[in-house]
Image (spheres, grey):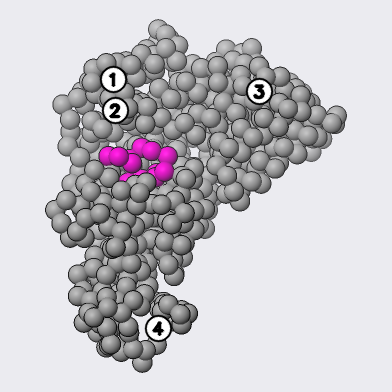
Amino acid sequence: MIWEAWLTLAVVTLAVLVLTRDLVSPAVAFMAAVVVLLIADVVTPGEAFQGFSNPAPITVAALYVLARAVEKSGALQPMVRATLGTARSVRGALARMTVPVAAASAFLNNTPIIAMLSPQIGEWADRRGDSASRYLMPLSFAAILGGMTTLIGTSTNLVVSGLLEEQGYDPFTMFELTRVALPLALVGLVVTVLVSPNLLPDRLPPRQEAREGGRSFSVRMIVEPGGPLDGLRMDEAWSVLPEGATMVYFERDGEGAGQPHPETVLKGGDFLTLLGDTDVVLNLHDISGLASSQQPHLPFEFRSARHSYFEAVIAPESRLVGQSLIDIRFLARYQATVVAIHRAGEPVHGHLAQAQLKPGDTLMVIADQGFGERWRGRNDFMLVSRLGAPAPPLSPNAVVVLAVAAAVVVGAGLQILPILHLSLLGALALVVLGILTPNEAKDSIDFDVIVVIGAAFGLAAAVESSGLGQSAADLIAAVSGNFGAQGAMAAIVVSTIALSSIITNNAAAALVLPIALTSAGTFGIDARAAAVAVALSASASFMTPIAYQTNLMVYGPGGYHFGDYARLGTPLTLVVAVGLVWSTLG
């Protein structure tokens, strides 16, 4: 390889390593990689930033606006009510849930679908005395499978379509992917419904863990000076704690910290870290002489009609990742106070305000009732749900929103106008009709995703122009040469799935597509078939919670452990991989 290819390989490898260690956001990592390659003259300015003039990121941005209108209007509430039926068996309930979710995800961004369904399914499972972990991961997988089936079902399909257009090919049509993706989605749904009850363990989400003897939220309390607990021995204080509370950590200024001892005499100003479910955390704040360590910072009375409790799941690109609550000045920024933290499989000990936060952490916050609307749909949190809140009502605008969505889908399907034009017209109509304000439309767009898409085009150009794509294709030919076109296609699919498990789907597709197109020419594979394989395999993100946004959204609320995803994700990944190799070469 020439030096440009070696440099491109080094830069891409470094970007991937940075992402796997969560050092910076994907947008920062990939834009930095593009800038380095631009400065090194591996790509021209036009090549580096061609993605931002491509229809793909603009289309994705417009579709975010449409998805926000669907969420705000409650247009999917009839589907939600139908989904939460009265099926007696787990498999029957899964069938009722996964099929409509997959169908809706074929035409709408799956993030708001999961955001609407996840809290309601958690409450529904709780009422049934069931574990939400039986349903939330299959729900996420159904959304992924459904999103694969159409051009607008996922941003990855639009990215690959845009890259094809850059290479001089026609872009994908609305239902071009459906021929291959729909059978895969149907088989995947059948596998999910049939095997997930046997493969998924019953995990207890935060609200149920303490009720069943497990551990969930971690909360830090302070003993009030002169209060009823000041001067009590630790074992005496334990008797006044609510049932289900577990004391795990004791701190006293000037004397260090450690495990609580029964004979320790409490003093005013001592800090106690306790574990319990949502009800326990709330009851702890009603104990006389015990207060939240955050209470001095609360801008309102802890118990009042003006505030509510929320669960907020931290997004991978959130400014909170790698920061503590003190670093981020949480109260000033969010007008809310964190009273507890849940981290799947890992209780948070010590000072909550000093704990470094991770993607998927579930924060229990106390805030005014507008907190959900202020932060729902932003990059900071993947999911914001008010505890005990009723299902959002169906807005009179729901019919208009669905009509706009249908016009976009039908217009694209009949090729009346390009999907870019239709999606922009749809977004504009929603603002003009007053269904969304301009600020709501702006806030609905995940600009980190848009930046990643734009940067991914620049990296794809570098892979191709530097000769790295040709070298990688030669390597695939050497390794899979004895297996012909089937071996080459298998290598493309497996490489894309593996890469999309550790970096974003859009970036994985952009990096692999130039290699796939070169390999297709070597083995006599149709270029569009190779592009379809890359697009669909990049979306086959079932193996880890960090592989896809909806997987991470249900990670904390479902109480899952990291390895739980591989249990159900492995058979689904095999179904998609084998099906893609067979169908794209058929």
Q: Find residue 430 and name its label.
A: 1
Q: Nearer the viewer, mark 1 or mark 3?
A: 3
| Residue that numbered label 2 is attached to | 69
Q: Residue 285 lies in what quarter of the image?
A: bottom left
| Classed neighbour count for the residue bearing mark 1: other residues with Cα under 10 Å, few (<14), some (14–19), many (≥20) | many
Amino acid type at circle 3 is Ala
Residue most extreme to the right:
2
Q: Residue at x 21, y 26 (%)?
A: 398
Work out how far the residue at label 2 is from the one at label 3, CA to CA, in angstroms: 33 Å
Q: Find residue 260 and name its label.
A: 4
Helix, strand, or loop for circle 4? loop
If you read the primary sequence from the N terminus, does the residue marked by circle 1 or circle 3 appear first? Answer: 3
Q: Residue at x 23, y 21 (%)?
A: 434
Q: Nearer the viewer, mark 1 or mark 4?
A: 4
| Of 317 and 496, the residue lying toward us | 317
Tell me where residue 256 appears, x and y as whole percent: 47, 80
| Residue that numbered label 3 is attached to | 48
Q: Residue 431 lies in what quarter of the image?
A: top left
Residue most extreme to the left:
305
